[in-house]
Image (spheres, rainbow, N blue to C red):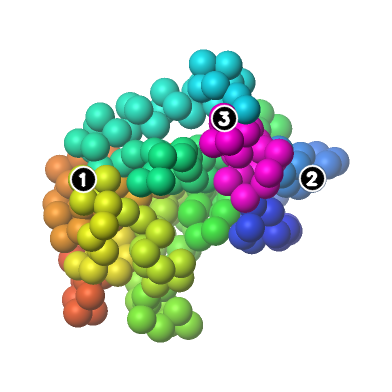
Amino acid sequence: MKQIKFIMGMPVSLEISNGENVGSGTFEKIFSYFADVDAQFSTYKPQSEVSKINRGEILPKDTSRKMQNIFLLAEQTRRQTYGYFNIATPQGNIDPSGIVKGWAIYQASLILRQEGIVNFCLEAGGDIQTGKPSEKKRGFWKVGIRNPFNRREIIKVLHLYNQGIATSGTYIRGQHIYNPHDPQKEIKEAVSLTVIGPNVYEADRFATAAFAMGRQGINFIEQTPGLEGYMVGQSGIATMTSGFGKFVI
């Protein structure tokens, strides 16, 4: 069973393995959750909490519990990545998009598990959280990495289960990721960087930071426990971490 909706400015899809006991309204519950996240954290919606903060209508100390949690997670990530992850933009606003998407997908996966659904593939804008088969079944989810120079081509096919994967890059949205240590410098050494983590939240936040590091990003992923990565450089040459190969079909 699979359904797709366009939310948060991107396609959100949920596929649930055959044999799972899907309750009434499960798909709608997940899609409604993403709609609520979009309404609160979007930088494009004038009435979102983020937009109100950026206009000075709400002080950071007066924000909601969820927003406070995102602030804490963002600060934790900033410290863990030596400042290469930062939700403060060069213009002085906040943009938590680099952490909210992975966080939202992971939180939605917890909703599915609360419903008793364990084997699923939940994707939003290319970032994915996979579930796992029951003990009686074996299998995995196939996930493809696109060629950043030809988006119709898949350059790697991976097998994942109960893991998350996220890709950061400039090949779709251009130079939307910046290096907080040198905001005016375009990131050209890397074109895409895919990270596999224990869940999509970990994969997403570290993929964003590692991409901002440029050519050193793949080394950061290599040195971070629990993560594996695959980076495509400007010349088209790919570099992968030492444990990435075990996921390749």
Any magenta on residue 46? yes
Residue underneath mark 1: 181
Any magenta on residue 52? yes
**In the image, which disc is placed on residue 28?**
2
The residue closer to the viewer here, 229 or 93, is: 93
- The answer for how far apart the CA atoms under marks 1 and 2 are is 42 Å
Q: Residues within 10 Å of mark 2 (few under 14, many from 20)?
A: few
Tell me the amino acid under the disc marked 3: Gly
Q: Residues within 10 Å of mark 1 (few under 14, many from 20)?
A: some
Q: Secondary structure at mark 1?
A: loop
- 2 or 3: mark nearer the eye: 3
Question: How far across and how far down the image is residue 192, in percent?
Answer: 32, 65
> Do we see residue 203 in this rendering?
no
Question: How far across and how far down the image is residue 7, in percent?
Answer: 68, 54
Looking at the rendering, the stretch of residues picked out in magenta corresponds to 37-56
Residue underneath mark 3: 56
